[in-house]
Image: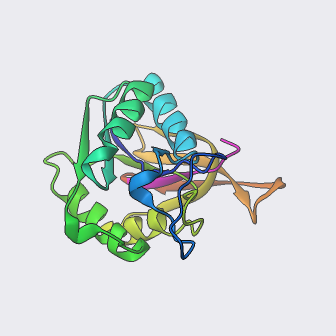
Amino acid sequence: MYSVVLTKGVPDFREGQVSFDEDGHLKRGETPTVMNPNDRHALRAALQTKVRHGGRMSVMSMGPPGYKEILQEAMESVYADDLYILSDREFAAADTWATAITLSAGLSQFEERPDLVFAGFKTADGETGQTGPQTAWCLDRPIVTHVISMAVDEDENKLRAKRLVAGDVDEIETVEAPLPAFVVADPDF
């Protein structure tokens, strides 16, 4: 089983950490960067999968070289085997679609095709929740979103997941998807 977790650095929005210019725009260079909080759910899902099924795990991010610390934190939390950072000035100010294209291009370069790619629910700095689904679309992979629990049946080469329907904890559905697949972990994972 080979899994990849996508993660992102976001500004540290805690009080006293954020720096703005005179026009009210965030000064990213003067605001500390932390791991996107929702990526921790994807990391937890990936770690659970690694513990149950073994295999290799990678962590990947698109961003400036300063994201290495975030990737190392992610790597340590899931005992990842390696990490990848896709970094170029051309990526600056990329929207979700450009980010998805870049991540899917990076994932396509791996010699071994990941069985599972994990992504967080949404980012703290954009809140759109589009990059994970768009990356899955670029890779032409089935995607299961709002995942709160999951299991992999390696004999059947399938992912079975419980997911929230319309974000309501009272409405949970069980779905199956063939591997390779893309998983967007819900905060309730």
Give the quadrant of residue 89.
Answer: bottom left
Compared with residue 54, is residue 71 higher up or lower down, i.e. above or below? below
Q: Which of these two is toward me, 81 or 76?
A: 76
Q: Position of residue 178 (x, y in %)?
A: 43, 55
- In the rendered structure, the answer to whether residue 40 lies left or right of residue 99 reads right
Q: Position of residue 156 (x, y in %)?
A: 42, 43
Q: Which of these two is toward me, 187 or 144?
A: 187
Q: Residue at x 43, y 52 (%)?
A: 30
Task: Find the magenta span and give its range.
Answer: 181-189
Compared with residue 187, is residue 25 higher up or lower down, i.e. above or below? below
Q: Position of residue 90 (x, y in %)?
A: 21, 71
Q: Is residue 188 magenta?
A: yes
* Numbered disc total: 0
- In the rendered structure, the answer to whether residue 185 lies left or right of residue 143 reads right
The quadrant in which the C terminus is found is top right
Give the quadrant of residue 167.
Answer: bottom right
Q: Position of residue 26 (x, y in %)?
A: 51, 65
Q: Residue at x 52, y 71 (%)?
A: 25
The quadrant in which the N terminus is found is top left
Q: Looking at the image, what colour scheme do you see?
A: rainbow
Q: Residue pushed farthest right? A: 170
Q: Which of these two is toward me, 120 or 15?
A: 15
Q: Residue pushed farthest front? A: 22
Q: Is residue 13 magenta?
A: no
Q: Residue at x 34, y 32 (%)?
A: 72
Q: Which of these two is toward me, 176 or 145?
A: 145
